[in-house]
Image (cartoon, rainbow, N blue to C red):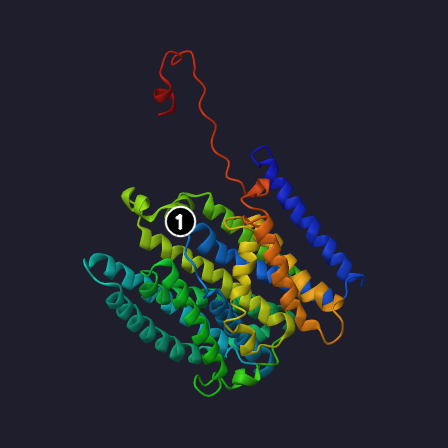
Amino acid sequence: MKNIDKSTLYFIGGSVLIFLIVQILVSVGILSTFWYTILRIGAVMAIVSLGLNLIYGFNGQFSLGQWGFYALGAYSAGDVTYRWTQLQSSGGLTILLLGVIMAGIAILLIRRLVNKLRGLDALSAFGLYLIGVILLAYLAVVVGGALENPVNSILKALPPEVSKQIVFVVAVLLGGLFAAEISFLFGLPVLTLGSDYFGIATLGFTVIVKVLLDNSDTMLGFAEMKGARGMIGIPKMTTWFWVFFFLVLVVIVTRNILHSSYGRAIVSVREDEIAAKAMGIDVANFKTITFVIGSFFAGLAGGLYAHINGFLHPDTFNFIKSFDPMIIVVFGGLGSVTGTVAASFAWALVLEGFLRLVLPEGFETWRFVVYPLLLLIMMLLKPNGLFGNYEMPFLRQVLPPLRKKTQSNENATDEEVLA
């Protein structure tokens, strides 16, 4: 215990305490189903927004594509669990699992090849990646279909609730990985654009995803998704435990990334790209890494969201809703993990909770007027956001102490001691 920092102990203790309080309130019936759902949605929004804060707040890339990757994670994870619970088939699980693995192998192999080729432009590299991923993804579909029956037998040998939980957790993780791989391919050509143009391109991506979801039953062949009618029959498996567990995990991963040498390189790109290049930092590489990690968080959150209400509709993922994570990040404070988490729960509690109950019947949609007014007042009074650059002690980066002068070097200069 001596090696564990006090701030870490406080964070762990506080997290366990918050989890237990909410769980007890739900178990004894004090917290209604409505507010229980609001809290879970708030945690999901925190995961999405943390990914965007990593991309925009810490890396400086203005992205409006977070909602598109959120949708990809939701539908892919929802389809896996739907097939298992409704059709008693692990086909969705095996195909998506092998598809993600095969696509990852293709990306790694082609990345090695591209690194050896000098002077290859971004579009040509994108073409190579796309061909390789499509070929191995097709192989994954063939092999995954052949493995469906053996995997069915293994899962059905387990207790039903255990197999259901395994399929759910794997589906959520695969939803995040699927979104991450799509973001890598999409980011290859568009990350070369300037920040404003990058934002427009990512907004276009969100619109494309929404149109594909509208036609998922006809254009993509997923009849169970029912296109513009909405997908039903998804098991409601996102409990407070799972959503809180993944939120804490994302916060810890984000904190460790930012405190590493990768994190310092990510922030340096935001501060000054030219200076970062002059210091030998591969700007394009760190933009890609940040974009992929942020998109993984979005896909992960989408998988959790799909299993809260058990229903998905393409209108939930339209481009207007894509501004919600951006609003949360700005409201909480750009570059503040603490502010993003707090603003996410405030967004859910105020917009989806209190304003729905406070406003007169028939005027519920006025919450979309009240909420922007609150945001406008906030920006006028505190433009740095709710928390500004503040972080809770656990999330602050602690610099190593300076070495004290000893008897042997007390006559040395400060530069020699610090060297």
Compared with 401, 182 (above or below) is below
Residue occupied by mark 1: 270
Q: Is residue 37 left or right of residue 189?
A: right
How crowded is the residue under tag 1: few (<14 C-alpha within 10 Å), some, or many (20+)?
some
- Residue 242 visible (yes or no): no
Q: How many marks?
A: 1
Q: Is residue 72 left or right of residue 17?
A: left
Residue 90 pos. (x, y %): 52, 77
Compared with 159, 349 (above or below) is above
Residue 14 pos. (x, y %): 67, 46
Looking at numbered disc 1 in the image, what kind of residue is underneath it?
Arg
Residue visible at 46% across and 48% down in the picture: 257
Residue 258 pos. (x, y %): 46, 46
Please name whichever residue, 419 or 350, is drawn nearer the observer in this view of the structure: 350
Residue visible at 54% across and 69% down in the picture: 321
Residue visible at 28% across and 64% down in the picture: 110
Residue 351 pos. (x, y %): 66, 64
Q: Which of the image's four quarters has the C terminus?
A: top left
In the displayed orientation, state which residue is furthest to the bottom. Answer: 218
Q: Is residue 330 left or right of residue 177?
A: right
In the displayed orientation, state which residue is furthest to the left. Answer: 118
Q: Which of the image's four quarters has the N terminus?
A: top right
The quadrant in which residue 344 appears is bottom right
- Residue 417 visible (yes or no): yes
Please name whichever residue, 138 or 220, is drawn nearer the observer in this view of the structure: 220
Q: Is residue 390 left or right of residue 283?
A: right
- Classify mark 1: helix, strand or loop: helix
Compared with 146, 287 (above or below) is above
